[in-house]
Structure formats: structure tokens, C-alpha cells
Amino acid sequence: MLNLEQTKELYDFLRGESEVNIKSNKGVEFEINKSKFYTKKSHLPRMTDEQAFLVIYLLQEAYNFEDFIPDHYEICSQCGELYDSELEGGTTGDEMYCGDCYTEEENED
């Protein structure tokens, strides 16, 4: 099962935010979960925050990968950070907030 940090690493990779080492004009090396990978730079994903989380959400819910990526990992509606909803945060209507933003939301009411 992925922990929250590993899920954030996947999220960052999907958004094109992973650190890469350029090996040549076309080749790059990147590391995920302490494993090194090599590919063409043009093959690396560059999804928006929403697209990247949709992939994670589909793995969690549509493909029943809750044992792989727990379904209590959510994205904050305000700051866009991933968080563990079993440990922090809350909801207001359809919006989900991490611990920091949920506290701010409560203080504004």
C-alpha cells in the first residue's frame, strides 16, 4: 500500500513535477520510490492538478485499488495539496479541505 508521501510522489510525477536528470538531448532519468527509470523527455506526463488527481481517484474508486492507494487520500479544494482525510481536514458542502485550509475556512465563518 502506498503511504501519503508515495502517493504525493505519484501525483507530482503525473504533473511533471518530478526531479529529472537530463542524460542527453532526448533522454532523462528520474527516480520514484527509490527506483531509477529512463525514458525520453517527451514521454514524461505533464497533467494539470485536476487530471493527475483524477488518475489517482480512478485507481482508488473505479478500479478498486483501495488496497494500493487508500481512498482517504484526497486533494484540498483550496490549496490543491494531497492530504489524509482520516487524519486531518474536513468538508463543507461538496468541498474538501486539508487541515490548514479547513481551519481557515472555519475561522472565516
Image: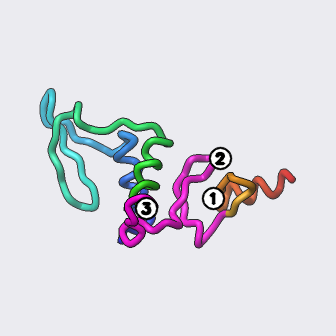
Alpha-carbon distance for marks 2 and 1? 8 Å
Q: The disc labelled 1 sits on which kind of residue? A: Cys
* Direction from residue 106 to residue 10 in the image, left or right: left
Pick the residue in front: 87 or 53.
53
- For the magenta stretch, what is the residue range? 61-89
Residue type pointed to by label 2:
Gln
Q: Residues within 10 Å of mark 1 (few under 14, many from 20)?
A: many
Q: Earlier in the sequence, mark 1 or mark 3?
A: 3
Quadrant of res 5: bottom left
Q: Which residue is mark 2?
A: 78
Q: Mark 2 touching mark 1, by CB under 8 A?
A: yes
Amino acid, disc 3? Gln
Which quarter of the picture shows residue 91?
bottom right
The label nearer to you, 1 versus 3, is: 3
What x and y, as percent, mark residue 40? 17, 35
Disc 2 crowd, CA 10 A, few/some/many (<14, 14-19, 20+)? some
Q: Residue at x 45, y 68 (%)?
A: 70
Q: Does the stretch in magenta take in 12?
A: no
Q: Which mark is residue 98?
A: 1
Is residue 43 positioned above or below 18 on the image? above
**N-terminal label among 2 and 1:** 2
Question: Which residue is disc 3 drawn over?
Answer: 60
Q: Is residue 16 left or right of residue 88?
A: left
Q: Tag 3: Cα neighbours inside 10 Å, few (<14), some, or many (≥20)?
A: some
Residue under the point 42% across and 69% down: 66
Q: Mark 1: which secondary structure?
A: loop
Callout 3 secondary element: helix
- Residue 13 is situated, as x and y percent measured from the top left of the image, at 34, 47
Position of residue 19 relative to residue 59, above or below, is above
Tags 3 and 2 touching, CB below 8 Å: no
